[in-house]
Image (tube, grey):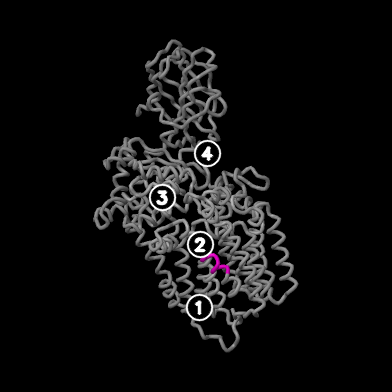
Amino acid sequence: MSRVELASKEKVLVGVFLAAFAALVIRNAWLSDDAYITFRTVNNFVNGYGLTWNVAERVQTYTHPLWMFLVSAAYFFTREIFFTSQILSIVLSLIAAGLLAFRASRSVWLACAGLAVLTLSKASIDYATSGLENPLAHLLLVVFLLVYFDAEFFPSLHPPHRRGQRGGGATLFWLAFLAALGMVNRADMLLFYAPVILYGLVRTRSLKAVGVVALGFLPFVLWELFSLFYYGFPFPNTAYAKLTSALISRQDLMMEGLKYLHNSLRADTITLFVIGLGTLTLFLTREWYKLPVVVGMLLYLLYVVYVGGDFMSGRFFSVTLFAALMLLVSSPVLAQRRTVQAIALAGVVLVGLSAPFSPVRASGEVGARTGTEPGWLYGRTITDERANYYRNTGLLRAFQQPNPLPDHDWALEGRAARVAAPPVVEKGSVGFYGYFAGPQVYVVDLLGLGNPLLARLPPADPDWRIGHFGRLMPDGYRETLETGENRIADPHLAAYYDKLALVIRGDLFNGERLRTIWQLNTGAYDSDLDAYAYFHGATFVRQFRVTNPTERPYVVAYVWNNGAGETYLLDDASSLGDTYTLVWHISRDGVQFDGPSVQRLSSIGLLSDTETLNVGVLFSPTPDLAVRDVYEYRFWFRLEDNGQLTVVLPGKGFHNAEAPQGYWFHEDIGAVMRLIPN
């Protein structure tokens, strides 16, 4: 791609557009709770605790090693994370936008249009900061495409005197090297880079080129080898937490992925509009050497849908937007059509300003804070993360507040925990909390993102949201973490944890540890996990010892599903401390009760796995059961085609002391309904 030099006046005009982009990025600069998950590792790393999240174990909780190392390098000198991370993000974002405008663009109007898109795109502005890896991903992709568009594979792009001056091997090396850095920054970026690399290999048709590409990919290979040795696994812990999706079907995930697209189309129209425009323009300009870039964009979009999108609106579209803009602004065909350029600039401004959550119209904390605003598609809690957290982490707000930011409740709780220093804490949102609690507090991430054992257990709650799959603490696991001795109650899970603990806590060079790494990654102990986490069979049997915690005389045991209940009156003259032993036999055809009872009250009929299977007991002062104290386990299950059931274990316990009007609380109900092993 021959470089187009802008005249001085043109540079001033482009500079104005770049300044507008910079102003809006700074106006909206913020940090997410998820960013502080990485920042806890950064803090541990710089302070000598290794690449850890909880210092007692080696677990990779970040998905962006290169970004983590870059932030660590800056943090090493500043010892301050709030301003350091935001300034670093802003600088990288401006460099990426500047290269797109001044280096890639073929005309002044294309440069201005590209910057206008970046300024009006919610995805672009929101994730120009946030503390996540997006700014570095944008920059690496822009540089990669600059090298690609300047490659000698396409001699028609160069004037005759320049042809052949650069060897194909050199270009392929740099393409592979930049792709490797991009993948170390985030592994799924392979989908963007692979089609271009493969096309380059096809064009060169040389075995030597394969070796050159392999050499270029060395940074990624070295990182994977290090990850396997140091952490014991090739992928981040977050990948295992999100891929262990229990009974969530691929169809359900893809439906959420489509909703993620729909959310962006409604709330941030310009982003997907320009991505589509960049794809379609290729077929009008016939610049076929750009086809691999389009293929990479489409593969990535399909991947986003396949994995269910994300809860952060727009996050996974910002890199695709940069790719689309690089296709458009670098087109010599479009550069020759001034009318088209003028229409394009006017069009993107109109589309960008018309979106209900355009960053020009909805900056700072203004946005979809509840998910019920007009024009916002909520899906399974697709959120406006910048609007949610700007009040607590906005860069400009830091200059207006007397106390340091973030001042989110989770950050305040974390600061209190640093002082109190509890040895183990269970939390569902761990970014702010974990960072400010400090290295002396072991934080159990109940979503599994930061916990190696929970990440490998299935989610127990069918009311999941993308990126937030809640787990249950196994009996004895907390005591295990507090004492350092394996006190996990289930023998299968205890055996698995012994192997896992050796890998993440044992001596790095221990020979048995290295053998166990191989065994864990090849599934040698997966049967132990499955035996603990699932029931597979035709009849699901649960045996309980029920203890009356009240003075209420009426005790009823039940199984509830599909709008009906199998219910039995166990006693009509019960008192505090009375106990009952009962067994439920549950199959797809119905439910059978085994145990002493006064009366059968109702029957259930056929089961449906569109609802949970609720197994419980209630205590009431009156025979009409109008007021009841209810304890129940809720099981997420699936009816298999072969007639069997798959049930997620051990079941989630709930209590409602004032049913039917009272609130349900998730809690340990073992004192009332103690499971007796079969």
Percent position (x, y) of residue 283? 67, 69
Query: Which residue is label 4 attached to?
Result: 463
State the mark number for residue 660.
none
Sooner in the amino-acid sequence: mark 2 or mark 1:
2
> Horizontal and vertical percent for residue 51?
35, 56
Circle 1: residue type: Thr
Instruction: Name the N-terminal-most of marks 4 and 2.
Output: 2
Asked whether, in this view, residue 12 is left or right of residue 400, the answer is right
Pointer 1 local density, CA inside 10 Å: few below 14, some 14–19, many at least 20: some
Residue on which the image places disc 1:
204
Task: Estimate the spatial distance between the alpha carbons at disc 2 and disc 1, rounded to whole Å.
Answer: 37 Å
Task: Indicate whether 668 appears above or below 77.
Answer: above
Category of crowding for the residue at label 4, using alpha-carbon neighbours closer than 10 angstroms: few (below 14), some (14–19), many (at least 20): few
Residue 308 in sight here: no
Cα separation, mark 3 vs mark 1, equals 49 Å
Q: Amino acid at mark 3?
A: Tyr
- First-in-chain label (3 vs 1): 1
Image-quadrant location for residue 232: bottom left
Tell me the kind of residue under disc 2.
Answer: Ser
Name the residue tied to disc 3.
435
Q: Which residues are magenta?
A: 88-97
First along the sequence among labels 4 and 1? 1
Query: In front here: 6 or 179?
Result: 6
Secondary structure type for disc 2: helix
Q: Quadrant of the N terminus?
A: bottom right
Which of discs 4 and 3 lies nearer the camera? The answer is: 3
Residue indicated by mark 2: 89
**Residue 209 lies within the magenta run:** no
Mark 4 or 1: in front is 4
Tag 4: residue type? Asp
Of labels 3 and 1, the one closer to you? 3
| Measured Cα–Cα span from mark 4 to mark 1 | 51 Å
